[in-house]
Image (cartoon, rainbow, N blue to C red):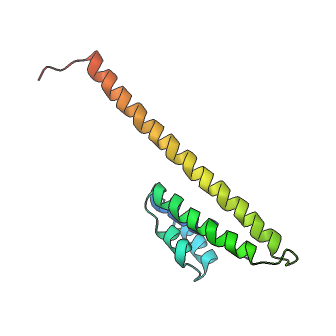
Amino acid sequence: MSCYELEAFRLGLMNVLGTADRSAREHAEKELDGHPEGPIEALTKAKTLSEIERHLDAALVDLEEEIAATDADDPEYDYLRGRLVAVRDAEQSVRRLTKQGESILEGVGETHDLLHETFPVDE
C-alpha cells in the first residue's frame, strides 16, 4: 500500500519550494512507481500553492470515492480512511502556508510604505 497523494504532494511542494534534494525526489517518485495519473500526476507537476491545493482537492474526491466503493470489512478500508485524514491535513497545511506567505507579502508592503513615510522622496 502506498500513499500516492502524499508522495505526489511532496513532489509538488518540492517544485514550489525549489527543493534540489535529488534523493528526496527520487524516493517520492519511486513510491509512486508509475501510478501518477489524474490529480496525482497533476500534483507531481504543480508549480504553485494554488495548483497544489486544487489538485489535492481533486485527489481527495477520488479517494473519497474509493473509500465509498470499499467494503468496511476490507482489510484496506481503515488504511484508506487514514489516507483521507492525511490528505485533508495536507490541504490544511497548504492553506496555512498560503496564508503565511500572503501575510509576509502584506508586511513587506507595509514596511515599504513606512519607509517612504519616514524618508519621503521628492520626484
Image quadrant in which the C terminus is located: top left
Please tell me whether residue 123 is drawn above or below residue 73 in the rendered image.
above
Direction from residue 45 to residue 3 in the image, left or right:
right
Image quadrant in which the N terminus is located: bottom right
Q: Residue at x 35, y 32 (%)?
A: 109
Furthest residue in direction left, as rendered:
123
In the image, 92 versus 7, the foreground residue is 92
Q: Residue at x 44, y 58 (%)?
A: 48
> Can residue 88 be seen by looking at this rendering?
yes
Where is residue 19? Give x, y as percent.
48, 59
Furthest residue in direction bottom, as rendered:
34
Q: Residue at x 78, y 78 (%)?
A: 70
Direction from residue 34 to residue 42 in the image, left or right:
left
Where is residue 119? Give x, y as percent.
25, 17
Please tell me whether residue 29 is drawn above or below residue 101 in the rendered image.
below
> Can residue 7 be seen by looking at this rendering?
no
Q: Quadrant of residue 62?
A: bottom right
In the image, 20 versus 95, the foreground residue is 95
**Count of marks placed on residues:** 0
Where is residue 97? Give x, y as percent.
54, 47
Q: Residue at x 22, y 18 (%)?
A: 120
Furthest residue in direction right, as rendered:
73
Please tell me whether residue 109 is drawn above or below residue 118 in the rendered image.
below
Where is residue 26? Give x, y as percent.
56, 73
